[in-house]
Image (spheres, grey):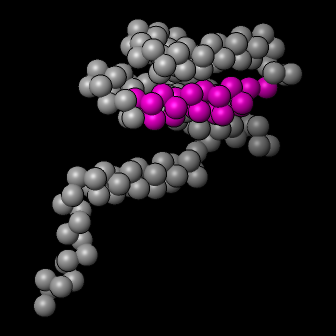
Amino acid sequence: MYAATAQPFASFANPAARQALGGLYQQVRVESKVDGASPHELVAMLFEGFMEAVAQARGALREKRTEIKGAAIGRAVRIVEEGLRAGLDLRGGGTLARDLHELYGYLAMRLTLANLRNDEAALEECQRLMRPLHEAWLAIAEDAAAAAPAARR
Protein backbone atom coordinates (compact mmCIF):
# COMPACT_ATOMS: atom_id res chain seq x y z
CA MET A 1 0.00 0.00 0.00
CA TYR A 2 2.69 2.50 0.98
CA ALA A 3 5.32 1.34 -1.48
CA ALA A 4 3.58 3.08 -4.37
CA THR A 5 3.28 6.38 -2.49
CA ALA A 6 6.91 6.32 -1.35
CA GLN A 7 8.20 5.88 -4.91
CA PRO A 8 8.07 9.60 -5.87
CA PHE A 9 10.49 10.38 -3.04
CA ALA A 10 13.00 7.68 -3.93
CA SER A 11 14.85 10.16 -6.14
CA PHE A 12 16.11 11.99 -3.02
CA ALA A 13 18.54 9.11 -2.50
CA ASN A 14 20.35 10.60 -5.52
CA PRO A 15 23.06 13.05 -4.33
CA ALA A 16 22.16 15.63 -6.99
CA ALA A 17 18.50 15.57 -5.95
CA ARG A 18 19.49 15.90 -2.29
CA GLN A 19 21.68 18.89 -3.15
CA ALA A 20 18.79 20.53 -5.03
CA LEU A 21 16.49 19.96 -2.07
CA GLY A 22 19.11 21.46 0.24
CA GLY A 23 19.36 24.48 -2.06
CA LEU A 24 15.60 24.98 -1.97
CA TYR A 25 15.58 24.71 1.81
CA GLN A 26 18.39 27.27 2.03
CA GLN A 27 16.52 29.65 -0.29
CA VAL A 28 13.33 29.44 1.77
CA ARG A 29 15.29 29.90 5.00
CA VAL A 30 17.07 32.98 3.64
CA GLU A 31 13.86 34.48 2.25
CA SER A 32 12.19 34.00 5.64
CA LYS A 33 15.07 35.78 7.39
CA VAL A 34 15.01 38.64 4.87
CA ASP A 35 11.28 39.28 5.23
CA GLY A 36 11.55 40.18 8.91
CA ALA A 37 14.99 41.79 8.91
CA SER A 38 15.82 45.39 9.69
CA PRO A 39 18.04 47.33 7.26
CA HIS A 40 20.97 46.75 9.63
CA GLU A 41 20.32 43.01 9.70
CA LEU A 42 20.06 42.91 5.90
CA VAL A 43 23.54 44.42 5.54
CA ALA A 44 24.86 41.96 8.14
CA MET A 45 23.40 39.13 6.05
CA LEU A 46 25.18 40.53 2.97
CA PHE A 47 28.51 40.51 4.83
CA GLU A 48 27.88 36.95 6.04
CA GLY A 49 26.88 35.82 2.56
CA PHE A 50 30.02 37.38 1.11
CA MET A 51 32.30 35.65 3.61
CA GLU A 52 30.53 32.33 3.06
CA ALA A 53 30.71 32.63 -0.75
CA VAL A 54 34.44 33.43 -0.70
CA ALA A 55 35.11 30.55 1.70
CA GLN A 56 33.19 28.22 -0.61
CA ALA A 57 35.18 29.53 -3.60
CA ARG A 58 38.47 28.89 -1.79
CA GLY A 59 37.44 25.33 -0.97
CA ALA A 60 36.30 24.67 -4.52
CA LEU A 61 39.53 26.12 -5.89
CA ARG A 62 41.58 23.75 -3.72
CA GLU A 63 39.42 20.82 -4.86
CA LYS A 64 39.69 21.95 -8.51
CA ARG A 65 35.90 22.24 -8.79
CA THR A 66 35.87 25.04 -11.34
CA GLU A 67 32.10 25.36 -11.76
CA ILE A 68 31.46 25.68 -8.02
CA LYS A 69 34.37 28.12 -7.65
CA GLY A 70 32.98 30.31 -10.43
CA ALA A 71 29.45 30.27 -9.04
CA ALA A 72 30.66 31.15 -5.54
CA ILE A 73 32.83 34.00 -6.79
CA GLY A 74 29.95 35.23 -8.95
CA ARG A 75 27.72 35.26 -5.86
CA ALA A 76 30.36 37.20 -3.90
CA VAL A 77 30.67 39.79 -6.69
CA ARG A 78 26.89 40.21 -6.84
CA ILE A 79 26.75 40.71 -3.08
CA VAL A 80 29.41 43.41 -3.31
CA GLU A 81 28.08 45.16 -6.41
CA GLU A 82 24.30 44.76 -6.15
CA GLY A 83 24.03 44.70 -2.38
CA LEU A 84 26.74 46.55 -0.52
CA ARG A 85 27.96 49.00 -3.18
CA ALA A 86 24.52 49.77 -4.60
CA GLY A 87 23.19 50.47 -1.10
CA LEU A 88 25.65 53.27 -0.36
CA ASP A 89 24.37 56.84 -0.09
CA LEU A 90 27.11 58.64 -2.00
CA ARG A 91 25.48 62.05 -1.56
CA GLY A 92 24.73 61.94 2.14
CA GLY A 93 27.30 59.38 3.24
CA GLY A 94 30.32 61.63 2.93
CA THR A 95 33.87 60.37 2.80
CA LEU A 96 33.01 57.03 4.38
CA ALA A 97 30.51 56.18 1.63
CA ARG A 98 32.95 57.20 -1.09
CA ASP A 99 35.77 55.17 0.50
CA LEU A 100 33.52 52.12 0.78
CA HIS A 101 32.41 52.60 -2.83
CA GLU A 102 36.05 52.47 -3.94
CA LEU A 103 36.83 49.49 -1.70
CA TYR A 104 33.84 47.54 -3.02
CA GLY A 105 34.92 48.29 -6.58
CA TYR A 106 38.40 47.01 -5.76
CA LEU A 107 36.96 43.85 -4.19
CA ALA A 108 34.81 43.14 -7.26
CA MET A 109 37.86 43.54 -9.49
CA ARG A 110 40.05 41.30 -7.29
CA LEU A 111 37.35 38.63 -7.12
CA THR A 112 37.03 38.64 -10.90
CA LEU A 113 40.79 38.32 -11.33
CA ALA A 114 40.89 35.58 -8.68
CA ASN A 115 38.34 33.67 -10.71
CA LEU A 116 40.23 34.09 -13.98
CA ARG A 117 43.63 33.25 -12.49
CA ASN A 118 42.60 30.67 -9.87
CA ASP A 119 44.28 32.91 -7.31
CA GLU A 120 43.51 31.82 -3.76
CA ALA A 121 45.71 34.60 -2.32
CA ALA A 122 43.38 37.17 -3.93
CA LEU A 123 40.37 35.45 -2.39
CA GLU A 124 42.07 35.52 1.02
CA GLU A 125 42.86 39.21 0.50
CA CYS A 126 39.19 39.94 -0.17
CA GLN A 127 38.15 38.16 3.02
CA ARG A 128 40.86 40.00 4.97
CA LEU A 129 39.67 43.37 3.66
CA MET A 130 36.02 42.63 4.36
CA ARG A 131 36.46 41.10 7.83
CA PRO A 132 36.96 44.40 9.75
CA LEU A 133 33.89 45.91 8.08
CA HIS A 134 31.82 42.87 8.96
CA GLU A 135 33.03 42.89 12.55
CA ALA A 136 32.42 46.63 12.92
CA TRP A 137 28.92 46.25 11.48
CA LEU A 138 28.11 43.50 13.98
CA ALA A 139 29.55 45.60 16.82
CA ILE A 140 27.10 48.45 16.17
CA ALA A 141 24.05 46.15 16.08
CA GLU A 142 22.78 47.29 19.49
CA ASP A 143 23.13 50.97 18.56
CA ALA A 144 21.31 50.36 15.28
CA ALA A 145 18.49 48.50 17.03
CA ALA A 146 18.12 51.32 19.59
CA ALA A 147 18.11 53.98 16.88
CA ALA A 148 15.51 52.20 14.72
CA PRO A 149 12.49 52.85 17.00
CA ALA A 150 13.58 56.48 17.45
CA ALA A 151 13.78 56.95 13.67
CA ARG A 152 10.18 55.75 13.24
CA ARG A 153 8.76 58.44 15.55
Image location (x, y in percent) of residue 133:
56, 16
Q: Is residue 3 magenta?
A: no
Residue at 13 percent across and 83 percent down: it is: 3
Q: What stretch of residues is rendered in magenta? A: 69-89
Task: Check the picture and name the quadrant holding the C terminus.
Answer: top right
Q: Is residue 21 left or right of residue 99?
A: left
Residue at 81 percent across and 21 percent down: it is: 90
Task: Check the picture and name the quadrant holding the N terminus.
Answer: bottom left
Image location (x, y in percent) of residue 143:
62, 26
Relative vertical location of residue 7 with respect to residue 49 in this rendering, above or below? below
The kind of secondary structure the magenta stretch mainly shows is helix
Image location (x, y in percent) of residue 137:
56, 22
Residue at 54 percent across and 20 percent down: it is: 112
Visible in this render: residue 71?
Answer: yes
Q: Is residue 14 left or right of residue 93?
A: left
Foreground pick, 2 / 137? 2
Visible in this render: residue 124?
Answer: no
Relative vertical location of residue 142 with respect to residue 24 in this rendering, above or below? above
**Hey, which residue is sitting farthest right in the picture?**
91
Relative vertical location of residue 151 with respect to residue 111 in this rendering, above or below? below
The image quadrant of residue 18 is bottom left
Foreground pick, 25 / 32? 25
Image location (x, y in percent) of residue 110:
55, 14
Relative vertical location of residue 10 with respect to residue 87 in this rendering, above or below? below
Residue at 43 percent across and 24 percent down: it is: 54
**Hey, which residue is sitting farthest bottom in the picture?**
1
